[in-house]
Image (spheres, rainbow, N blue to C red):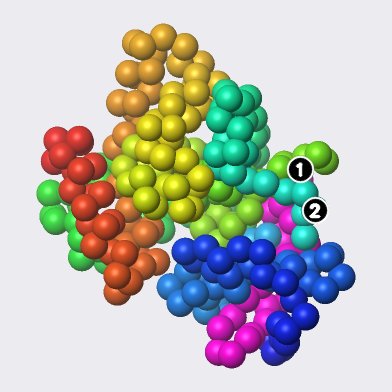
Amino acid sequence: MEKIELSKWNMFSNRHNSENYNSPDGKWMLKLGFPGFCSTKEELLLEQSICRKVLSLGIPTPQVGEIVEFEGRNGLIYERIEGKRSISKCVGEEPAKLDYYIKFFAENCKKLHSTECAPGTFKDAEEKYSRLLEESRMFPENVKEFARKIIKETPKVFTCIHGDMQTGNLIINDKGAYFIDLGEFACGNPLYDLGCYFYFCHYLPDDYLLAAHYMNAATMHKCWDVFAKYYFGADTPEKMAEVDARVKPYVLFPILDFEHLMAENENLKYLEMNFQVARKDLGI
């Protein structure tokens, strides 16, 4: 891991989980993480390895470069995708085209979820969530038992899942679409991914969503309805209700992910509030 001098790099965004810089020649970008958000050398080595494996399966993602260090913080260098915008930003900037962009997002998620991967290629989602469940301090025993039952009854399949599936993690330009932030990429049932997106669309407050996803909660709710229409064919209220009932229990798993990633982070109190709302919705 080499040290990097950032005096000639240009910061283009400062988000809740990282600072992002463009290289002087414009060919590369650096994602410099904050503590708790994929910022240790071990976490970055894993993400680097995942990115290379994902590319080998034909899943579009930026080329990954080297791990670097700046003033005690670690980061990963990626190919710069010129003219890129996330689906979140596209919808935030062009709300009249929400249907178009979310349909595109749904289609790309279906392609991802139809890509098979051999056992052992990536972490196993079922094993990961079983472990996080036992480590959780937030979940009381009755919720743990509810989640164990979900894991046990979820059909075992060997397909690719993103692990943090939401519209901020698909970027596009005039050449195509690319999945990013692959640190939680896994092998498992797409229902775990779908629960993640359902969580983002239904349980986060306006201030967080506007800062991180360029949309408020009402727009995110609409995004889910459009997504479900194109991903599941849920084109009637009855079909939508069936989809929601099927996916909603899986919101517990992104909460486990965030509890683990945030550790003692001050935002953990907001996650706790989200968890209590989800718990009430699920009747547990």
* Residue 141 to residue 93: above or below: below
Which three-letter amino acid code belongs to the residue tagged 2?
Glu
Residues in magenta? 52-79
Q: Is residue 244 above or below residue 21?
A: above
- Amino acid type of the residue that numbered disc 1 sits on in the rendered structure: Asn
Query: Which comes before the other along the chain, label 2 or label 1?
Result: 2
Q: Quadrant of the C terminus?
A: top left
Q: Residue at horizontal 72%, vertical 72%?
A: 10
The reply, left or right, for residue 144 in relation to residue 151 is left
When asked about the image quadrant of residue 264, the answer is bottom left
Say if residue 48 shows up in the picture: no
Left or right: where does residue 191 sit relative to residue 24? Answer: left
Relative to 116, is 163 on the left or the right?
left
Instruction: Give above or below for 271 relative to 284.
Output: below
Q: Label 1: which residue?
A: 173
Pointer 2 and pointer 1: residues touching (CB < 8 Å)? yes
Looking at the rendered structure, the secondary structure element under dot 1 is strand
Which residue is at the front of the view, 143 or 145? 143
- Residue 64 in the magenta stretch? The answer is yes
Residue 245 image point, x, y percent:
30, 26
Q: Which residue is mark 2?
A: 82
Counting other residues with Cα less than 10 Å from the Cα at mark 2, is it few (<14), some (14-19), or many (20 or more)?
Answer: few
* Relative image position of residue 255 (x, y in whole percent): 32, 53
Residue 253 on image: x %, y %: 35, 49
Instruction: Name the foreground residue: 85 vs 243.
Output: 85
Q: Residue 281 at what x, y percent from top left?
A: 20, 35
Q: Nearer the viewer, residue 146 or 25?
A: 25
Residue 4 part of the magenta segment: no
Q: Residue at x 74, y 68 (%)?
A: 22
